[in-house]
Amino acid sequence: MTTSDKSKSGKLTTGEMVVFSVLGAIMFCSKLLMEWAPNIHLLGVFIIVFTVVYRKKALIPIYIFVFLCGIYGGFSPWWIPYLYIWTVLWGVTMLLPVKMAGRVAVVVYMFVCGLHGLFFGILYAPAQAIIYSMSFQAVTSWVIAGIPFDCMHALGNFAAGILAVPLIRVLRMFKTKQSF
């Protein structure tokens, strides 16, 4: 069985393991580099790009990123929502058409990225509610208090979303030239 046959059969090739490890590390490093700007990062656009190019296998670099965050920052309550919050964006991206016209794709990816940022606090809330035994009123107050940060998150993600189409092109070009 050749490496391309393994890749098509769903089994990971050695090359894919390396690439996915690097992509997960890039996500993690980009998060660290952008920590000076609260709620502004490239994670959403990376998840969209990896999902468009690698489909189901995009979960691998996403969860490498998640576990690197836990190793670096501690596997504490803030980390638990990371186990599902990024998968929501992956799932939404999986529902989008694989092939879209360039201009349409730019707008769609920007909006999807922005909406994920806008709803980040709401997506984070269930874990907070369970971990801290919060009442519905407390969770609602927590979400409302976070709206300004979610709006900033949405604007940052929306702007970063413009990078999706060029990054998809680069990653597809790299994927076709892989010789391992």
Image (cartoon, rainbow, N blue to C red):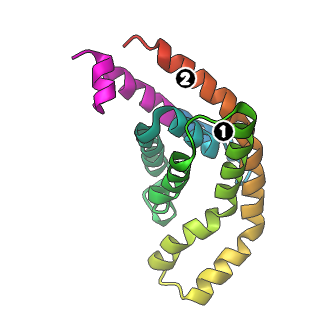
Q: Is residue 21 above or below residue 65?
A: above
The N terminus, quarter of image? top left
Type of amino acid under label 2: Arg
Q: Percent from the top left, x then y, of residue 8?
A: 33, 27
Q: Is residue 149 above or below residue 137?
A: above
Secondary structure under tag 2 reads helix
Residue 149 found in image quarter = bottom right
Q: Is residue 116 left or right of residue 134?
A: right
- Is 16 a magenta residue? yes
Q: Total label count? A: 2
Checking the image for residue 33, the label placed there is 1
Eye-nearest disc, 2 or 1: 2
Residue located at (44% from left, 57% from top):
83
Range covered by the magenta-colored residues: 1-25
Residue located at (57% from left, 87% from top):
136
The C terminus, quarter of image? top left
Q: Percent from the top left, x then y, of residue 85?
A: 52, 58
Q: What residue would you read off at disc 2? A: 172
Mark 2 Cα shell of 10 Å, populated few (<14), some (14-19), many (≥20): some
Secondary structure under tag 1 reads helix
Residue 15 found in image quarter = top left
Residue located at (41% from left, 41% from top):
56
Q: Is residue 16 above or below residue 109?
A: above
Secondary structure that dominates the magenta span: helix
